[in-house]
């Protein structure tokens, strides 16, 4: 084991609960094992790749074709999109990567602790000028993610962010999402931005779906096939993105299996134009997302 991995385990390891290892592509990861769940989080991009709550099926989807390379985003889990979303890069960075730098940056582990109720919190940090980022992830019967952004400069600064969560679903055509009824959204399929409004019905899926909703509401991903509801609660997030690439777009992505699209759905929590966050010098913003799982009957 490399000296630094050894040092990480010495500083933050928790016997039989938390260990650091070389994962896919040699990228370092934290492996969490508790009675509540098993989980995996990579230092690269501070990216969660697994959260498997005890008594349920795996919740986070990871492509079989995912790449684990220093300059690429891992396809699946929970990519951290920052300081912009999608291609909303600023004029001064015209060649910046899609969804910004955070998900292709090497973060540092800064703390780990196990609580009295046996949940485990792992903390990481990184700097993306002019911001300092802190990411706290708590692994328990629910998955708690908190992204705190601080403007470390002497001038106002603004950013977009999103926790771009990929969920496992039984069959995309048989699931639905509630909580966004009547919300306004931008339909961005095909690269356009069409202003729309959700009707009073849950969101169902029968084609490529790429929508940025204006909503701070909790959502529920109802999956009769897996006999579960995934609950997504959030604080300080005014945007919810719902995305499935469907067949053609899946085929066009080299790190996304051609036949994987029916088994996944992204429900992403963030702050995306026109809900970008403006921070005065020294100010901070904390967005929190809590994911839970409830069992239901098969009907
Ligand atoms: O989920 C919304 C979205 O912006 C989609 O348009 C799609 O591009 C997806 O993110 C994945 O982006 P990525 O850069 O990871 O391929």
Image: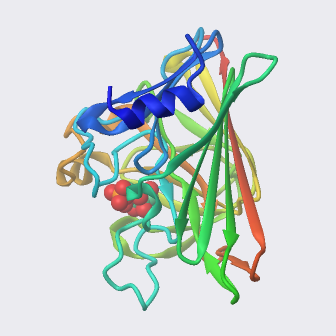
Closest to the observer, 7 or 283: 7
Closest to the observer, 228 or 89: 89
Position of 225 with respect to 289 (left or right) is left
Closest to the observer, 200 or 13: 13
Closest to the observer, 29 or 7: 7
User: Would you place residue 17 above or below residue 208 in this image?
Assistant: above
User: Would you place residue 223 above or below residue 262 in this image?
Assistant: above
* Residue at x 48% of width, y 21% of height: 58
User: Would you place residue 115 above or below residue 197 in this image?
Assistant: above
Where in the figure is residue 195, as x and y percent of width and height? 56, 75
Q: Quadrant of the C terminus?
A: top right
Q: Quadrant of the N terminus?
A: top left
Displayed-image quarter of ligand 1: bottom left
* Residue at x 25% of width, y 48% of height: 69
Where in the figure is residue 95, as x and y percent of width and height? 31, 80
Where in the figure is residue 222, as x and y percent of width and height? 60, 30
Name the colouring of the figure: rainbow
Position of 275 with respect to 225 (left or right) is right
Q: Is residue 197 visible in the rendered structure shown here?
A: no
Position of 97 with respect to 90 (left or right) is left
Q: Is residue 158 visible in the rendered structure shown here?
A: yes
Report the residue that reaches farthest toward the right. 116
Number of residue marks: 0
Where in the figure is residue 228, as x and y percent of width and height? 60, 20
* Residue at x 38% of width, y 27% of height: 21
* Residue at x 25% of width, y 32% of height: 64
């Amino acid at each position: 084991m490399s000296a630094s991995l050894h040092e990480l385990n010495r500083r933050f390891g928790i016997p039989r609960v938390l260990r650091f290892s070389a994962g896919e592509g040699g990228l370092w990861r934290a492996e969490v094992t508790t009675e509540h769940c098993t989980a995996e989080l990579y230092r690269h991009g501070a990216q969660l790749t697994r959260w498997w709550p005890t008594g349920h099926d795996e919740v986070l989807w990871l492509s079989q074709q995912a790449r684990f390379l220093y300059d690429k985003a891992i396809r699946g889990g929970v990519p951290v999109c920052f300081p912009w979303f999608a291609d909303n890069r600023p004029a001064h960075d015209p060649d910046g990567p899609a969804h910004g730098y955070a998900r292709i940056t090497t973060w540092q582990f800064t703390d780990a602790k196990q609580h009295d109720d046996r949940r485990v919190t792992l903390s990481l940090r990184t700097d993306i000028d002019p911001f300092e980022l802190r990411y706290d992830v708590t692994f328990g019967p629910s998955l708690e993610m908190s992204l705190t952004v601080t403007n470390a400069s002497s001038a106002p600064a603004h950013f977009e962010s999103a926790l771009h969560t990929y969920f496992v679903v039984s069959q995309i055509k048989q699931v639905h999402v509630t909580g966004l009824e009547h919300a306004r959204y931008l339909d961005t399929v095909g690269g356009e931005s069409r202003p729309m409004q959700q009707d009073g019905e849950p969101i169902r899926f029968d084609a490529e779906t790429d929508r940025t909703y204006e909503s701070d509401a909790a959502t529920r991903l109802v999956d009769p096939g897996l006999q579960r509801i995934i609950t997504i609660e959030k604080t300080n997030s005014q945007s919810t993105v719902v995305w499935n690439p469907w067949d053609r777009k899946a085929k066009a992505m080299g790190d996304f299996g051609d036949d994987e699209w029916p088994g996944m759905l992204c429900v992403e929590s963030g702050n995306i134009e026109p809900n970008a966050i403006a921070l005065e010098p020294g100010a901070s913003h904390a967005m929190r997302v809590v994911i839970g799982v409830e069992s239901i009957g098969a009907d």
